Image (cartoon, helix red, strand yellow):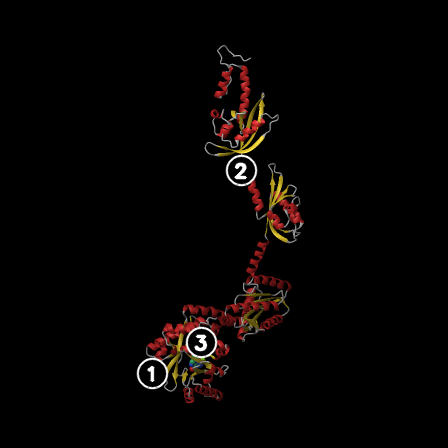
Amino acid sequence: MLKPSDEKLPPSWEEERDRIIGLGERSFKKSYYPELRDNLSRLERFRTLLDFSGEMILLVELPAGRVIDANAAAFEMLGISQATLLGMEITALGIRDAAPLLTTLNADSSATTPTLHHLETQIHGQDGGRTPLDLSYRVAVVDGTPFGILLGRDAGARIASEAQLRLAARVISRSGEGIMIADAGGLIIEVNTAFEKITGYTREEALGRNPNFLASGRQDAEFYRLMWHTLNESNFWQGEIWNRRKNGEVFPEWLSLSAIRDDADKITHYVGTFSDVTEARAREARIQHMAHHDFLTGLPNRFLLMDRFSQVAASAQRNDTRFALLFMDLDRFKNVNDTLGHTVGDQLLCDVARRLSQAVRTTDTISRQGGDEFIVLLGEIESPEAAAQVARKLTQVLSEPCQLGGHQITVTPSIGIAVSPEDGSDLDSLLKHADLAMYDAKQQGRNNYQFFRREMNARSLEMLLMESDLRLALRKGEFELHYQPQVAIGSRQPVGVEALLRWRHPERGLVSPVDFIPMAEETGLIVPIGQWVLETACQQAAKWRAGDWPEMKVAVNLSAAQFRQQELIVLTRQALAAAALPPQALELEVTESILMSDAEGTSTTLNELSAMGITLAIDDFGTGYSSLAYLKRFPVDTLKVDRSIVRNIGTDEEDAAICSAIIGLAHSLHLEVVAEGVETQAQYDWLAAAGCHYVQGYFTGRPEPAAACLSSFQAAEAP
Ligand code: C2E
Ligand code: MG
Ligand code: MG
């Protein structure tokens, strides 16, 4: 059948076949055997097909398991050249599990219908690399002879994508966010564990349902319509929605919805992820509360007050009604802090806050402005009298003493009232006016309330300016001390001086302490100012004593606020030490009112000062309570008869009687006695006759700066 196509001696057709197959030659055009050429050409077409396949194809001879044919993918995947591969046993190709595979093939070779087997295995390459392999194999019988056919595919991609799927599944199931997946019809097909945890529904209960079974009813149909519309239009929607847990509890969740589309842009799934934001909402609410409330008392702070104020003011304007602002300051609250400590002070403030809150209507606002200042906003009042009524009520609820840390404390308020629209309509001016009125209440002896009056404005403005001026003055060193001699009545010799504070104001000139000390006391500035006085006076006295005046003493005035501060002893000791002044050269002047105020603490402090060697004088004696009992209780050394009594000794019998009584008292208690404000020879003589020890007044020397004071003393001594 096979005939050479021309005369030239042809090779045998076997030779021709082997030549073509062996060399892998693809051209048959020159073949001598047309039939062979046709057959080979058909074979070649299959060959091309096989080689084109990305899958490895091996044809194996049975039972030996030798490779008798393989496609290009096989050479490549196995990493073995064609020449080597053909004839190799499959157990030698590096395919794991090739031996049992061959056994199976051989077992199958006699079966009537061979089975297709699948195996997930690996190729162990020559270079040590491993390629995952999906292998299918079966027996094929050709002309009664069984062969093994192996089809292998690189499983890398499959394994990777499976791993990815597994990962995705794990991420979904472990996610802290609730996740639900719904089909195109909106029915749930999958939920994760967090979904179950947040909603309280199990997966089984949720599957197949429309997610609206979670709806709380807090959002209306229009809300959902918009949500679906946005989702279908832009494939995404997110927002906060309120849902209902299985246990009925309604909770806020932050929900993101995505529509998933296929290649044809048709929606196939919806994915919803959500987190329970109950905690976050609560935290936000707490922060909100903190931002608007006073940390200590929980009362509204200034921000919230401003907010409420604008509401009240707007409604008052609309309805043409009145409202009022009360400015309240606790009297002597600083005392509580200083003597009992801040913890008790804080507790007291909380207690006050609680009482005040209970005393007003819910429509009123009580706010703490820091410290011991409270502002009460009364929304809508009939008349100013209504505000006064509230002020009285607040005073009354505070009058009950409170028990704190073993102490019984009573606080009293000073309240200023400003009424809108009369006293202003904006918060700032009402606050300012109520503050001025409060200041007036303090001046009136505390524990009372005052309405704002127009004339308060000017005076109080001056006060305000004064306060900031005082602060500046201390920093700029505008204070100075003048010294007034105290003279021994018999010898007419000065024995010491009293240090008197002056303020050299850049515009107002020399300002008297009478004009600024009350303000300095009110603001607490007296403490640093007083400290400056003490230090300066000690230094000056030390200078004099080191110079021409070795025995002199200096008297320094102490205000109540200084006396209350706990560090008084320490600061005094420091001032003495810094100046190297012996304590015996220092006299401290205190007023009767200080002695009367807080007997326990006072006697401790006075005893300590006295024990140091410092002498104590009672200033302005005869004007105050003049309860003589304390003269025995406290370590007093000197009485200073007030100048209002001395002034009248020549003209007013009663004052003369008081003056001699004081001198007599001093003698019998073995105290020194100084007469203040002696201006005339007659007064001097009267006092000398009455047995007074010392005088201090214009008659013997005015208060003067240190240098002038010394020269006048030297002049007096000269003759
Ligand atoms: P004080 O302690 O009773 O001081 C005596 C006041 O009488 C001084 O007024 C003094 O200038 C004045 N004076 C003295 N001799 C005469 C006189 O013959 N006739 C008249 N009319 N007055 C006389 P000054 O300096 O204005 O002080 C007034 C008050 O200010 C003092 O009264 C004292 O309570 C207070 N003060 C002064 N310096 C200080 C200070 O450094 N600290 C404190 N806390 N208070 C001070
Ligand atoms: Mg004095
Ligand atoms: Mg005095």
Which amino acid lies under the numbered mark 1 shown in the image of this protein? Glu
Q: Residue at x 57, y 58 (%)?
A: 286
Of residues 94 and 25, which is closer to you in this image? 94
The residue that label 3 is drawn on is 558
Name which quarter of the figure residue 267 lies in.
Answer: top right
Which amino acid lies under the numbered mark 3 shown in the image of this protein? Leu
Which mark is nearer the camera, 2 or 3? 2
Q: Is mark 2 within 8 Å of ligand 1?
A: no
Residue 349 vertical position relative to residue 182 in the rendered view, above or below? below
Of residues 207 and 80, which is closer to you in this image? 80
What whole-number distance in Å separates the C-alpha atoms at marks 2 and 3? 89 Å
Which quarter shows the N terminus? top right
Residue 717 image label:
1
x, y percent for residue 255: 60, 48
Q: Assess disc 1: are there few (<14), some (14-19) or many (≥20) residues with their C-alpha within 10 Å of its C-alpha.
A: few
x, y percent for residue 206: 65, 46
Image-quarter location of ligand 1 = bottom left
Assign a secondary structure to mark 3. loop
Examine the rendering and report whether any part of residue 102 can be seen: yes
What whole-number distance in Å separates the C-alpha atoms at marks 2 and 1? 113 Å
Which quarter shows the C terminus? bottom left
Q: Is mark 3 within 8 Å of ligand 1?
A: yes
Of residues 344 and 656, which is closer to you in this image? 344
The residue that label 2 is drawn on is 160
Mark before the other along the chain sequence, 3 or 1: 3
Which mark is nearer the camera, 3 or 1? 3
Of residues 314 and 85, which is closer to you in this image? 85
Which amino acid lies under the numbered mark 2 shown in the image of this protein? Ala
